Image (tube, rainbow, N blue to C red):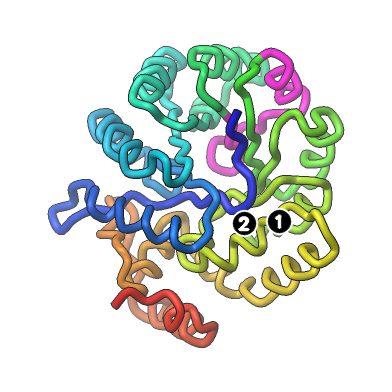
Amino acid sequence: MLKPTGSWVAIPTPYDHNGNIDFGGFKTLIDFHVAHGTSELFVMGSAGEVTLLTLEERQQIIKEVVKLGKGRIPIFFGATFPTTADTIKFSQFAEKEGADGLIYTVPPYLLPPQAAVLEHMLACMKSVSIPVGIYNNPSRVGVNIEPESIEVLAKEVPNFVVDKEAMSNVQQLVEVKRRLGDRINILCCDYPKYSIVLPTLALGGNGAANIGGNIIPEEMATIARPWDSIEIMEECRKTYFKYFPLLKALYWFSNPIVIKAALKILGLPSGGLRKPYPELRGEKLAELEVIMREMGVIEKYSQK
């Protein structure tokens, strides 16, 4: 069963000039990642403005993007809704449409207790047979999925394949890896404030579920390789340190504000942002372009 590994890039949802979903833009972004070594894509995560999409738009994205990626690059889709029933309904729709895999977060704002989190995840994951995983992001949703709960999921859900961790607590990574071994793949976010990419790989993790790959896909593919040799480890560390300032810039504000600005600089599809997200303008936009230019990113990846 498919298990995300390497550079798993969370891409934004591109819009056209009228603010509608730009499926031609989706195709261009997918082509870009196929050409530059990205391992898998994650659509409708936090970088995809998922909470600002209607149900109809999310269903349309599943229908169209599945076709764009099929046989070219595996694509996982965010499937979380506020209720367990709606999450299951959407999950089964996505499976029927041919999605490669689904990712669940704890429904935001609700702050359910851990037993309820586990019950929710079990029900959602068991409702489909395609690969599923969790995106553990307590800073966004207010609740951590504890290692004990992840261990239960791994024991009871045969199609549970990946745990994306997004927190600064390395102990969480250790506990998950110690309890689960190689039963599921562990990937981490590339948020510089957490800086858990190197610890995750050092512990035997399988890659990085990242936003940096939107702008530097080949470099993130180098960074996110599992450490199977000293050479890979050294190249990872060298590349990570080099591009760390760019990663910091991409996280100046909540995703996908800076990502979309960087995509526009490169001439790649992005469109605007749905309110209340603001566009990146002024000094910060100019600073971002300087960083990208000085690092050779514009020269290498510009589509203009």
Say if 287 sits above or below 5 in the image. below
Using the rendered view, name the quadrant where residue 231 is placed.
bottom right
What residue is shown with label 1? 197
Whole-angstrom CA distance, mark 1 to mark 2, is 6 Å
Q: Is residue 32 visible?
A: yes
Between residue 212 and residue 207, name the one nearer to us. Answer: 207
Question: Which three-letter amino acid code belongs to the residue tagged 2?
Answer: Asp
Q: Residue furthest front?
A: 71
Q: Residue furthest left?
A: 18
Secondary structure beneath disc 2? loop
Side of 207 where 13 appears, left or right: left
Q: Is residue 265 visible?
A: no
Query: Could you tell me which residue is drawn at 42 percent across and 21 percent down?
Result: 91
- Report if the CB atoms under discs 1 and 2 are less than 8 Å apart: yes
Can you give x and y, in whole percent of width and height, for residue 193 in the image?
66, 60
Which class describes the residues within 10 Å of circle 2: few (<14), some (14-19), or many (20+)?
A: many
Query: Could you tell me which residue is drawn at 27 percent across and 51 percent down?
Result: 274
Side of 154 where 77 appears, left or right: left
Side of 167 where 270 appears, left or right: left
- Disc assigned to residue 190: 2
Query: Could you tell me which residue is drawn at 42 percent across and 12 percent down?
Result: 85
Quarter of the picture holding the N terminus: top right
Can you give x and y, in whole percent of width and height, for residue 18 in the image?
13, 53
**What span is in magenta?**
133-156
